[in-house]
Image (cartoon, rainbow, N blue to C red):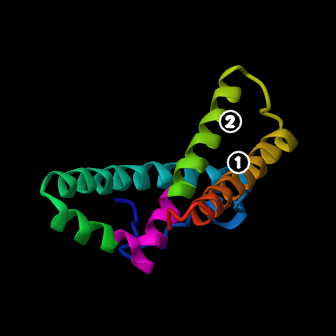
């Protein structure tokens, strides 16, 4: 019979945990998924708005009071960012679908452009909303 040790050996961890590091395209890919989920939540908020509208002025006023609160505005600001980020990242994916911009410098530039567009577009929309009295 062979001599088999009865002790449990510690298994090594995956090597990628020691050598892998975060990079911009991975972060924006994860953000793309997160903003997609946020857009589902935004759809529920929109559905709640239409239901409140259907239930009359009192329900609508209550719902708009909730959306107009500081927390509600923060959520709406985040949803605005999610819309613009998801749009920009979708355009980047369409470009990638053509086989272009896969080299690392171009992919990183696209990721930076995606985040920059989302931030600028969100701030511009909210500035316009504030200037027109929509806030």
Q: Report which residue position mark 1 lands on.
A: 114
Compare residues 124 and 74 and report the one nearer the observer: 124
**Residue 100 x %, y %:** 78, 25
Q: Say how many tags the image has.
A: 2
Left or right side of 2 for 100: right
Image point (82%, 46%), residue name: 109
Q: Give the range drawn in magenta.
A: 67-79
| Residue at screen point 69% across, 29% down | 96
Magenta span: helix, strand or loop, mainly? helix
Residue that label 2 marks: 92
* Residue extending furthest toward the top: 98
In the rendered image, residue 12, in percent from the top left (x then y), is placed at 55, 66
Residue 98, relative to residue 80: is it above or below? Answer: above
Query: Quick one: SS at disc 1?
Result: helix
CA gap, disc 2 and disc 1: 8 Å
| Image quadrant containing the N terminus | bottom left
Q: Residue at x 33, y 49 (%)?
A: 43
Residue 72 colored in magenta in the image: yes
Q: Which of 82 and 10 is in front in this view?
A: 82
Q: Earlier in the sequence, mark 2 or mark 1?
A: 2
Q: Are marks 2 and 1 in contact (CB under 8 Å)?
A: yes
What is the x, y in percent for residue 80? 53, 56
């Amino acid at each position: 019979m062979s001599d088999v040790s009865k002790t449990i050996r510690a298994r090594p961890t995956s090597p990628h945990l020691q050598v892998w590091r975060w990079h911009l395209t991975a972060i924006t890919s994860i953000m793309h998924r997160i903003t997609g989920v946020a857009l589902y939540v935004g759809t529920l908020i929109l559905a709640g708005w239409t239901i409140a509208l259907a239930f009359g002025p009192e329900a609508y006023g209550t719902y708009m009071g909730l959306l107009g609160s500081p927390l509600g505005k923060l959520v709406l600001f985040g949803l605005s960012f999610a819309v613009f980020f998801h749009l920009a990242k979708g355009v980047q994916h369409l470009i990638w679908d053509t086989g272009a911009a896969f080299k690392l410098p171009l992919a990183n530039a696209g990721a930076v452009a995606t985040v920059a567009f989302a931030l600028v577009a969100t701030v511009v929309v909210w500035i316009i909303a504030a200037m027109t009295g929509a806030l």
